[in-house]
């Protein structure tokens, strides 16, 4: 990896950028602080789903939430839980 000061790099900037495009990073020194010049390959943009449009991916994520342990309890489930609590809190007769 080449290391240059900013003054040295200034005159060679087109060549240094070309080298970076070829995968050869360049380390630039600016008064004791370092900066690296390297090729940047951005990720392709992810498809943005239209919330008004149904998609299998969106449906799958929504169903995960509905069927998660944090989903709302039905009335029957709440009544069953209450009945268990009441039975557990009743003192044993005997």
Image: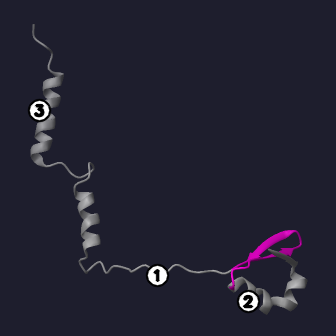
The residue drawn where x is 69% and y is 84% is 22
Residue for badge 3 = 83
Residue 84, image quadrant: top left
Residue for badge 2 = 18
The residue drawn where x is 78% and y is 86% is 16
The answer to which of marks 2 and 3 sits earlier in the sequence is 2
Task: Look at the image and tell me in which quarter the C terminus lies.
Answer: top left
Label 1 secondary element: loop
Q: Are marks 2 and 3 in contact (CB under 8 Å)?
A: no
Residue 38 screen position, x and y as percent? 70, 79
Residue numbers of the magenta segment: 22-38
Residue 90 screen position, x and y as percent? 14, 20
Seen in the image, is 49 located left or right of residue 87? right
Near mark 1 (Cα within 10 A), the count class, few <14, some 14-19 or many ≥20, is few
Q: Closer to the camera: disc 2 or disc 1?
A: 2
Near mark 3 (Cα within 10 A), the count class, few <14, some 14-19 or many ≥20, is few
Residue 20, image quadrant: bottom right
Q: Closer to the camera: disc 1 or disc 3?
A: 1
Residue 29 screen position, x and y as percent? 85, 74
Q: Closer to the camera: disc 2 or disc 3?
A: 2
Residue for badge 1 = 45
């Amino acid at each position: 990896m080449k290391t240059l000061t900013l003054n040295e790099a200034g005159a060679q900037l087109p060549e240094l950028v070309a080298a970076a495009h070829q995968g050869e990073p360049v380390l630039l020194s600016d008064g004791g602080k370092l900066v690296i010049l390297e090729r940047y390959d951005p990720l392709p943009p992810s498809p943005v789903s239209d919330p008004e449009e149904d998609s299998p991916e969106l449906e799958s994520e929504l169903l995960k939430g509905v069927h998660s342990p944090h989903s709302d309890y039905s009335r029957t489930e709440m009544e069953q839980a209450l009945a268990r609590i009441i039975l557990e809190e009743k003192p044993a007769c005997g």
